[in-house]
Structure formats: C-alpha cells, structure tokens
C-alpha cells in the first residue's frame, strides 16, 4: 500500500499544537485552482458552506446540500498538498442527532478525503461533537454568529454583546470540552474573543473577532474583492479582482465587436492575408 500525497498535509493535532504560537492562517476554497493558491500559503483550507452564496448565488447558506459540499470538496482536495483540509457540514446534515451527524460526516470524509469537518453550534452540539471525535472524526467547531442560524439571530448581527457574552463563552467551552480540535469565533466583540482565546486550550480561529485569536479565516472571494458591493467591516480586501475582471470582460467584448480579437497570434492554419480578406479588411 503506498502513501497518498495527503500524508504530507497538516493534521488536526498539528493545528491544535499551534495554540498560542504562530497564528494559523486559514482561507476558504471551492475549486481546484484556488485551492492550489491557498494551499501554497495557508495552514487550513476550508470548503465552507459559504460556497452556496459565493459560487451559487444563494441568499444564505441554508440551501447548501451535502452533495454540493462533496462536489466542491473533491475539487479542492485535488489542489491541496500541505494544508489541513476541512469541510463544512451543511444545514440539516447533522443537527438531528449524533448518528445522523456521524453518517453524513463519515460520507464526507470517505468521498472527499478531507481530514476534518466543521459544524456550527455550541452547547447544543456538544454531544454530537463528542460522538464524532470519539469515532475518529476530527471536528472544528464554530460559535458566535453561526450563519446557518441567521433566521434565529434576526440577521448577521454581532454576537456576545453585554450579557450575551456568557452564552458565547459557554458555547466555546462546551465544544472544547467535547473534543473539538479548534473553534471558529465568528462576529463577536474583540474583548470577548480575547477572553475566550485565553480560556480555551484549543486554538480559536477568528472571523470578525480579534487579532488575539490563535488564527484567522476569511472567505477567499471576499478578501480578493470579487464582489463589488459586499464590503463587510471584518473583511480586509487584499485585491480588487471585481474591478480587474470587469475591465477585462469589457475590453474583450469591445475587441470582439471591433474584430480586434482573435488576432494573428490566436489563429491556426490561416495566413495573415487570408484572415484580413475573411474579415473584410484589405491586405
Ligand atoms: O462557510 C464559511 O466559509 C465559513 C467561514 C468563513 C468560517 O464558515
């Protein structure tokens, strides 16, 4: 039996061991080429259920299915050689109970060869996380603003303000006690994120949280600036690809209409004089 290339990848214990050390760089990816780029620089590649909103134009993550996650995770797997690959469990695939969660998480791991799954929820998901981790499925937890509960929260609102801080802290402690190897803290106040980071023995991965977290994660399309009008406060845009892509597509359309594309260097088996004749030009 020969080892696969994945044996060179970071593992959940490697990520846990980074607690309090060099911050853990994480990004999402949904396709092979982007996964390759992320893998070259980051420690964790997450196939997030944000794929539904980012690539499929869904209004929230609620419509994402297990089949969608598996399809994208297989594509990402082909591009990851060194980072830890984590796949999100979509809404409705794990909340019923530990057995349902195990069945679906095992399918995700078997079909995608990811090394861990991520699921949303704190105290309410602790038994499920315990069940999965006791059966060989490493779990990254996710507390604070959990987007699959957007309707219950009444929107994508900051969590853990004032007295609500206690609830988020209990959620974080519960998933750590249940065996999660790391926990995403999404959209909570910075002092609360720092407090939780100090209290937990597992790494905290912040998104809209604090630089004091043990790592950070963003949706790759957001930090690349692929959406012109989506500029949440917690995202730093490292590029403006939307602008560059828009200019490129406009230039292409103009070239086609003016017959500037394709040019000589793009043609096969046709002489320059023939091409200009076919295009109605003079040689
Ligand atoms: O779905 C997702 O992309 C996520 C993160 C950004 C944490 O859950």
Image (cartoon, grey):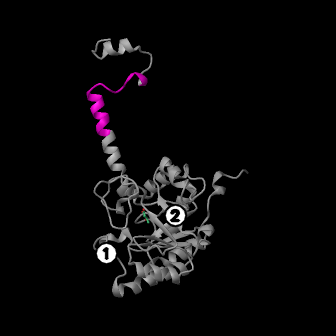
Horizontally, residue 186 falls left or right of residue 39, namely left
Q: Quarter of the image holding residue 152?
A: bottom left
**Residue 37 x/y as whole percent:** 51, 51
Element on which disc 2 rests = strand
Q: How many marks?
A: 2
Q: Which residue is mark 1?
A: 153
Q: Is residue 269 visible?
A: yes
Within the displayed image, which quadrant is ligand 1 positioned in?
bottom left
Dominant secondary structure (helix, strand or loop) of the stretch shown in magenta:
helix
Location of the C terminus by quadrant is: top left
Q: Which mark is residue 25?
A: 2
Horizontally, residue 48 falls left or right of residue 82, namely left
Nearer to us: label 2 or label 1: 2
Q: Is residue 252 magenta?
A: yes
Observer-nearest residue: 198 or 185?
198
Please report the residue visible at 29 percent of the width from the left and 24 percent of the height from the top. 259
Element on which disc 1 rests = helix
Please report the residue visible at 50 percent of the width from the left and 82 percent of the height from the top. 173
Q: Quarter of the image holding residue 181?
A: bottom right
**Above or below — where is 145 with respect to 112?**
below
Lower position in the chain sequence, tag 2 or tag 1:
2
Q: Quarter of the image holding residue 66?
A: bottom left
**Residue 194 x/y as whole percent:** 46, 80
Dot 2: within a 10 Å radius of its alpha carbon, few (fewer than 14), some, or many (20 or more) residues?
some
Q: Is residue 239 magenta?
A: no
Calculate the distance from the C-alpha at mark 2 to the C-alpha at mark 1: 28 Å
Dot 1: within a 10 Å radius of its alpha carbon, few (fewer than 14), some, or many (20 or more) residues?
some
- Residue range in magenta is 249-265
**Residue 276 x/y as whole percent:** 33, 15
**Residue 68 x/y as whole percent:** 43, 54
Observer-nearest residue: 239 or 196?
239
């Amino acid at each position: 039996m020969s080892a696969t290339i994945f044996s060179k990848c970071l593992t959940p214990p490697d990520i846990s061991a980074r607690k309090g050390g060099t911050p853990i760089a994480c990004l999402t990816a949904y396709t092979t080429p982007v996964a390759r780029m992320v893998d070259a620089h980051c420690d964790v590649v997450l196939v997030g259920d944000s794929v539904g909103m980012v690539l499929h134009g869904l209004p929230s993550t609620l419509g994402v299915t297990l089949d969608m996650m598996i399809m994208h995770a297989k594509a990402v797997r082909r591009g990851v050689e060194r980072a830890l690959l984590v796949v999100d469990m979509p809404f409705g695939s794990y909340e019923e109970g530990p057995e349902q969660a195990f069945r679906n998480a095992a399918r995700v791991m078997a079909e995608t060869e990811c090394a861990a799954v991520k699921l949303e929820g704190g105290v309410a998901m602790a038994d499920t996380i315990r069940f999965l981790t006791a059966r060989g499925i490493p779990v990254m937890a996710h507390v604070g603003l959990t987007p699959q509960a957007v309707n219950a929260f009444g929107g994508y609102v900051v969590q853990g303000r004032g007295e609500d801080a206690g609830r988020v802290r209990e959620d974080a402690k519960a998933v750590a006690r249940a065996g999660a190897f790391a926990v995403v803290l999404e959209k909570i106040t910075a002092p609360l994120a720092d407090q939780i980071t100090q209290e937990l023995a597992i790494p905290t991965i912040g998104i809209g949280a604090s630089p004091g977290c043990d790592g950070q994660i963003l949706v790759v399309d957001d930090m690349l600036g692929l959406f012109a009008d989506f500029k949440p406060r917690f995202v730093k845009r490292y590029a403006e690809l939307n602008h560059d892509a828009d200019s490129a597509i406009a230039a292409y359309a103009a070239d086609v209409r003016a017959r500037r594309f394709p040019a000589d260097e793009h043609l096969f088996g046709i002489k320059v004089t023939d091409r200009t004749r076919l295009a109605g030009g003079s040689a």
